[in-house]
């Protein structure tokens, strides 16, 4: 069973960059139908798809975040990462990393990382 | 890329069958058979219940079933149980050229 774990700073200052890494265990991310995805959930609100990345490095981003977003993948370390620049309080959320089965369905999820944007 | 529309809340009694709706457009729900449903308990990560409109991942109870008609997808829960009380989200593929995904606004299911 694939397991995912988010890691990174839990407090980020406004205008700075939010950085998170997802470490995958129990399987390989170097698969044609594997996409690593990021999804966030502001406190008390619904889910928002941030974007996804294939092990080849090909990315798909939410148009509303594209100008501030960068994702990368390190298959040797079985990790993929998220960077969101120029953050504001509106970016405060629980950030989940997931495995997308290539069919827009997120089969496995990390436990989530609450990241607060505050000075 | 607008959120899919779900009723904010639904309630039902134990043993009852209940259907949750998820309405989109021809650019998402109506355009692809890539609709998924998730169950989320407070403070927990969502869990995939249904993928590709009507398929259940291994281990998901057959009390959960999915369907789609036009731009509206549905999740039916049969034999409602107290443990089904949770938030439910739908999602859909949303762009013909990329792997973009859009989520629904979520439905809070209360078991009376």
Image (tube, coloured by chain):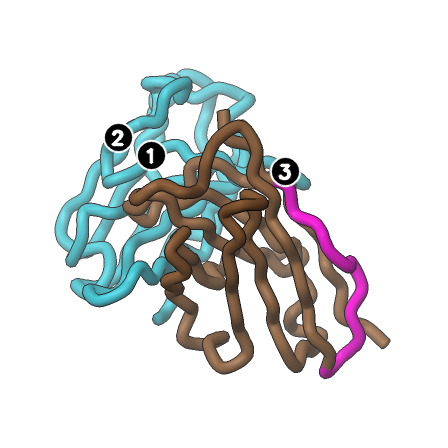
Left or right of A6? Residue A103 is: left
* Foreground of the two, A80 or A39: A80
* Foreground of the two, B8 or A67: A67
Would you say residue B52 sits in the magenta stretch? no
Q: Are marks 2 and 1 in contact (CB under 8 Å)?
A: yes
Q: Earlier in the sequence, mark 2 or mark 1?
A: 1
**Image coordinates for residue B69, horizontal then vertical, percent:** 15, 46
- What residue span does the magenta drawing correspond to? A5-15
Q: Residue at x 27, y 60 (%)?
A: B24
Q: Residue at x 63, y 53 (%)?
A: A21
Instruction: Identify the residue position indicated by label 2 in the image.
Output: B55
Would you say residue A9 sits in the magenta stretch? yes
Distance between mark 3 and mark 1 Cα atoms: 18 Å
Q: Earlier in the sequence, mark 3 or mark 1?
A: 3
Q: Which chain is home to disc 1? A: B
Secondary structure category for the residue under label 1: strand
Quadrant holding the N terminus of chain B: bottom left
């Amino acid at each position: 069973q694939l397991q995912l774990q988010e890691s990174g700073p839990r407090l980020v200052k406004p205008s700075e960059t939010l950085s998170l890494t997802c470490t995958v265990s129990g399987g390989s991310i170097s698969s044609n139908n594997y996409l690593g995805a990021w999804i966030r959930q502001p406190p008390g609100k619904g889910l928002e798809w941030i974007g996804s990345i294939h092990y080849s490095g090909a990315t798909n981003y939410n148009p509303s975040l594209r100008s501030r977003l960068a994702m990368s993948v390190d298959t040797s370390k079985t990790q993929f990462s998220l960077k969101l620049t120029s953050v504001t309080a509106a970016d405060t959320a629980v950030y989940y990393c997931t495995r997308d089965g290539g069919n827009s369905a997120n089969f496995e999820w990390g436990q989530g990382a609450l990241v607060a944007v505050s000075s | 890329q607008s959120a899919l529309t779900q009723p904010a809340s639904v309630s039902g009694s134990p043993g009852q069958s209940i259907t949750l709706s998820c309405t989109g457009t021809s650019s998402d729900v109506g355009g692809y058979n890539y609709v998924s449903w998730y169950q989320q308990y407070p403070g927990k990560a969502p869990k995939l219940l249904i993928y590709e409109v009507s398929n259940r991942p291994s281990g998901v109870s057959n009390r959960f079933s999915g369907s789609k008609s036009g731009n509206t997808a549905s999740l039916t829960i049969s034999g409602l149980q107290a443990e089904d009380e949770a938030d439910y989200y739908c999602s859909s593929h949303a762009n013909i050229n990329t792997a973009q995904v859009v989520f629904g606004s979520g439905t809070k299911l209360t078991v009376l």
